[in-house]
Image (cartoon, grey):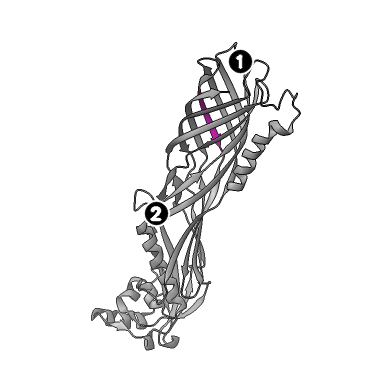
């Protein structure tokens, strides 16, 4: 990002120098009745208009992944029986009998399981949305003519709150083969709660760097019209850093990482009981950079030939992608990948005071 900003700023600085001294468009001298440069400072209020998009999840557990069940509480098996199953009366009766005494099904009896549903899935009704934010805006303009200018929009990069929406569930299903399958199988199915993205006032926060560059057309004439409307079109660049996730959501994702690791460790029963595995979980949050077209309508009002007021409204069609990964640092294996498009699409309202020179 620094290279991009440096390139634009450097280009702006060199334009008058590289051009011919008598050029009517590139010069450090005043134009014909107008000043070449202006800068303004004011309040910049950003109002994202985008809606939450579903979170997509995939894990290290492929469809039909075979894992031993291991020791498991009988009640856990009962709680996760597929409600649409064809009952296996003998095996279910045995499990319920063990459960009635608060017992555990040992690894010798529980057999193997074939896990489904955790390979990849979407989560309708979930997603992330950026909140409104206000910061200090700085706008600089170079005027090629009295009517045509090139503007660079910048400001103090604000911390933006990212709101969460909805609850992520894992659509777990499995076919278990207790007693080696000699008495038939057990079909399990349950939507396992992973995390509530709305459990706190914000799911995450990030610092947003969103410089924009526009060519603008200013109506009217300097020295004749104090009030001059203008329109502009250009490009916005968005970069996000200093991302921090809500601690509650992070803890839920660590637990989900242990769930996946337990299946890999041939201990699927511990996965259903949300027990910690032998892994050391790390949760990473990233956001992609993005470019977006931006359009602006605004006005300036001259107090005198040097000082002016400015107001504008801009819209940028901006969308990026958030990425969350859960990694077992002991093995380096990525256990969970989740992605979500983040529609920002901000309206930017600006009001400031400027100076021409």
* Rendered view: 76 above or below 325: below
On the image, numbered disc 2 is attached to which residue?
197
**Is the stretch drawn in magenta largely helix, strand or loop?**
strand
Q: Quadrant of residue 191?
A: bottom left
Q: Which of 193 and 337 is in front in this view?
A: 337
On the image, numbered disc 1 is attached to which residue?
222
On the question of residue 193 being in view, the answer is: no
* Rendered view: 52 above or below 303: below
Q: How far apart are marks 2 and 1 (CA)?
A: 53 Å
Residue 225 image position (x, y, % from top left): 58, 12
Q: Residue at x 44, y 85 (%)?
A: 181
Residue 95 image position (x, y, % from top left): 32, 81
| Viewport quadrant of the C terminus | top right
Would residue 108 appear left or right of 241 to someone viewing this image?
Answer: left
Which residue reaches farthest top?
224
Identify the magenta region.
Answer: 310-316
Q: Does the magenta stretch include residue 315?
A: yes
Q: In which quarter of the image is residue 89?
A: bottom left
* Rendered view: 207 above or below 72: above
**Which type of secondary structure does the marked residue at label 2 adopt?**
loop
Q: Residue at x 49, y 45 (%)?
A: 208
Q: Which of 62 and 79 is in front in this view?
A: 62
Mark 2 or mark 1, earlier in chain: 2
Q: Residue at x 60, y 36 (%)?
A: 213
């Amino acid at each position: 990002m620094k290279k991009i900003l440096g390139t634009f700023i450097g280009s702006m600085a060199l334009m008058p120098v590289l051009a011919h001294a008598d050029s009517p468009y590139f010069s450090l001298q005043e134009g014909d009745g107008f000043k070449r440069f202006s800068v303004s400072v004011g309040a910049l209020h950003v109002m994202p208009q985008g809606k939450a998009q579903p979170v997509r999840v995939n894990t290290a557990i492929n469809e039909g992944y075979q894992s031993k069940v291991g020791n498991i509480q009988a009640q856990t098996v009962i709680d996760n029986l597929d409600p649409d199953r064809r009952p296996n009366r003998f095996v279910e009766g045995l499990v319920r009998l063990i459960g009635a005494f608060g017992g555990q099904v040992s690894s010798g009896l529980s057999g193997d399981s074939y896990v489904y549903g955790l390979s990849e899935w979407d989560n309708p009704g979930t997603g992330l949305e950026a909140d409104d934010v206000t910061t200090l805006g700085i706008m600089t303009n170079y005027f090629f003519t009295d009517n045509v200018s090139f503007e660079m929009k910048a400001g103090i990069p604000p911390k933006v709150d990212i709101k969460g929406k909805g609850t992520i569930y894992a659509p777990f299903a499995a076919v278990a083969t207790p007693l080696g399958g000699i008495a038939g199988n057990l079909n399990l199915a349950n939507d396992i709660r992973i995390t509530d993205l709305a459990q706190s006032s914000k799911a995450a926060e990030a610092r947003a760097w969103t410089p924009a560059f526009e060519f603008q057309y200013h109506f009217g004439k300097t020295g004749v019209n104090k009030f001059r409307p203008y329109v502009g079109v250009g490009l916005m660049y968005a970069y996000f850093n200093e991302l921090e996730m809500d601690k509650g959501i992070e803890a839920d994702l660590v637990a989900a990482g242990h769930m996946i690791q337990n299946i890999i460790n041939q201990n699927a029963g511990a996965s259903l009981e949300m027990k910690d595995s032998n892994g050391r979980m790390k949760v990473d949050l990233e956001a992609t950079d993005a470019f977006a077209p931006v359009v602006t309508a605004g006005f300036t009002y001259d107090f005198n030939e040097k000082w002016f007021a400015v107001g504008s409204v801009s819209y940028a069609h901006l969308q990026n992608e958030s990425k969350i990964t859960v990694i077992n640092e002991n093995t380096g294996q990525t256990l969970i990948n989740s992605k979500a498009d983040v529609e920002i699409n901000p309206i930017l309202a600006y009001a400031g005071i400027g100076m021409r020179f």
